[in-house]
Image: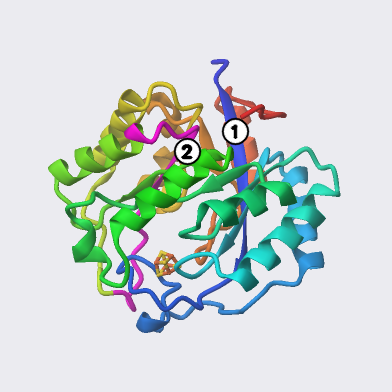
Amino acid sequence: MNNKTIYLCAISNIESGTCNEDCKFCAQSVKYKADIERYKRKDIDTIVEDAKKASANQAVGFCLVTAGKGLTDKRLEFVARTAHAVKKQNLGLKIIACNGTASLEQLKELKKAGVDNYNHNLETSREFYPQIVTTHTWDERYETCENVHRADLKLISGGIFGLGESDENRISMIKSIASLKPMNVPINFFHPNKALPLVENSIDKKKAFELIKLVKKMNPDSHKIMVAGGRELMFGEDQYRIFEYGANAVVIGDYLTTKGNAAHKDIEMLEKNGYKIATVCSQ
Ligand code: SF4
């Protein structure tokens, strides 16, 4: 029995698979023609229902994710209206927006609409980034993260492992994340898709556990180390051991374009392993 508290966060993909960027790990890029659901804007009533489901599944965070390089005026207006509609439900959820690169003014607008936190991942190291993405720069990503602080939103920033990066690249990325002092650090493990230019994940389970530990060690003041995409695929039956290595948060339910465990299965397994599920999140 242990008393570690685990935080659950749910995702709603509110605009899916319509992105013109070329991130080699992402099925949402139109360039790779992956077989995923694609739509422009999810209906706001449906998103509110997603939020209610998230709350019923004990999530403390609810993340509004849009595909695309960043916020445009139209997208900003849509996300702001959505955040406002979810906030009005008083579900006790922290609202997280994850909408790519954003200016200080745009982020301030989101804050006004009720968004609490902004998620923008560095994805990989500055040095390795040009091998993974050619349509925008890593520096733009870093700048958005700095804007999040300036807008007085809480920053959530992490990355993805298994893209063929070296150990040096991994350390460089984690150092950059740490330099931003994010409140939460999401870690993703690449989920291969045959339509993508990257066909396999370059790390194994042992390495993945070590990386969680390293992320935690190098970000000691971050409130949450969250294992997000790729958890089930990378860790299989050992997936609840991630908490022994420093993780204290997971995504519950489905991911952006891949299925997750059924929420009730995660909840049962967390309880069976003696973890407490957080009922509120102050951060
Ligand atoms: S990671 Fe974001 S910017 Fe890159 S292709 Fe996917 S949706 Fe577009």
Q: What is the x, y in percent for residue 203?
A: 23, 49
Q: What is the x, y in percent for residue 114?
A: 73, 47
Residue picked out by circle 2:
226
Q: What's the coloring here?
A: rainbow
Q: What is the x, y in percent for residue 174?
A: 29, 38
Task: Give me the C-alpha separation between circle 1 and circle 2.
Answer: 8 Å
Q: For the residue marked with disc 2, what is the amino acid?
A: Met
Query: Mark 1 touching mark 2, by CB under 8 A?
Result: yes
Residue picked out by circle 1:
7
- Which residue occupies the foreground of this view, 121 or 61? 121
Residue at the image point whose x is 49% and y is 65% from the top:
70
Badge 2 crowding class, 10 Å Cα cut-off, few under 14, some 14 to 19, many 20 or more, is many
Q: Quadrant of the C terminus?
A: top right
| SS label for mark 1 | strand
Task: Tell me which label, 1 or 2, sits earlier in the chain.
Answer: 1
Q: Is residue 132 inside the magenta stretch?
A: no
- State the extent of the magenta-drawn residues as a range: 179-196
